[in-house]
Amino acid sequence: MPCNPSAEAYPATRPFGSLSNTLMKSSPAPPGWEAGQLSSIVRPSKSCLAMHWSKLKQHIEELFSPTIRGRVELHSTWYRQGGRSSSRLWITIDGNEVYQFSSLKTAMAEMRLAYGIAEANSAKADTTDKFWDSLRKGADEAGPILEKQGLYTFEQAHSALEKYISIPLEEALQSDNLITRSLAILDRRLGKRRLLTLELKAEEHPLIERLYAFRCAVEKFRSEKKGQ
């Protein structure tokens, strides 16, 4: 089925204005480039999302354990900043935000990291063109690094939620994707016995630790990290 979401449901995300202008001043772009075009170096956002947010939110929250359903919730919004639009998705427990996935925050972090990688890799570059080639390669390296740190755009988070609906629990628990593993901790298919024997990584992401401790507290038994 072709995906054709409305502009109102999924506005375009182009958060690079001020940062790209700053980078242009420090390292002029090749002839013909404009400041706004710097954003095209970063991995493009997935602008076509298959499921509308309200329906996706309902599907995911229905997968939550009955003991936490209504206490853990997903939210999303989009907004304009500096003439450009952006979007974010966040998780709340009892109405308090515990984590967010922001297109603006992630894009800015990716651009800064890509620039740092480019500077390191092109220290001996003798032309501007070589630096910009390094910047493109830096963006490719920056993405996976930020994902390991838990930084995802709204589009990436939305896509992970869509995929979660159709994957087995064990696959979700073993996933390297922070969003997928977070949802697995909350999943009704993760029973008390399996939750009790579940071992977290020695250096687990704080979001996983937070959700695991919350789920264990609700189920009324103590949470433990591997190695403790």
Image: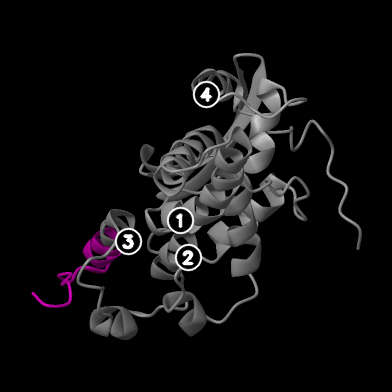
* One can see residue 69 in this view: no
Residue closest to the eye, 200 or 46? 46
Q: Which is more N-terminal, label 3 or label 1?
A: 1
Q: Is residue 204 left or right of residue 137?
A: left
Question: What is the number of the mark on residue 147?
Answer: 1
Between the C-alphas of marks 3 and 2, the distance is 11 Å
218 is within the stretch colored magenta: yes
To which residue does mark 4 refer?
A: 19
Q: Which is more N-terminal, label 2 or label 1?
A: 1
Between the C-alphas of marks 1 and 3, the distance is 14 Å
Between the C-alphas of marks 4 and 2, the distance is 28 Å
Question: What is the number of the mark on residue 161?
Answer: none
Residue closest to the eye, 156 or 135? 135
Residue bounds of the magenta highlight:
212-228
The kind of residue on which mark 4 rests is Leu
To which residue does mark 2 refer?
A: 177
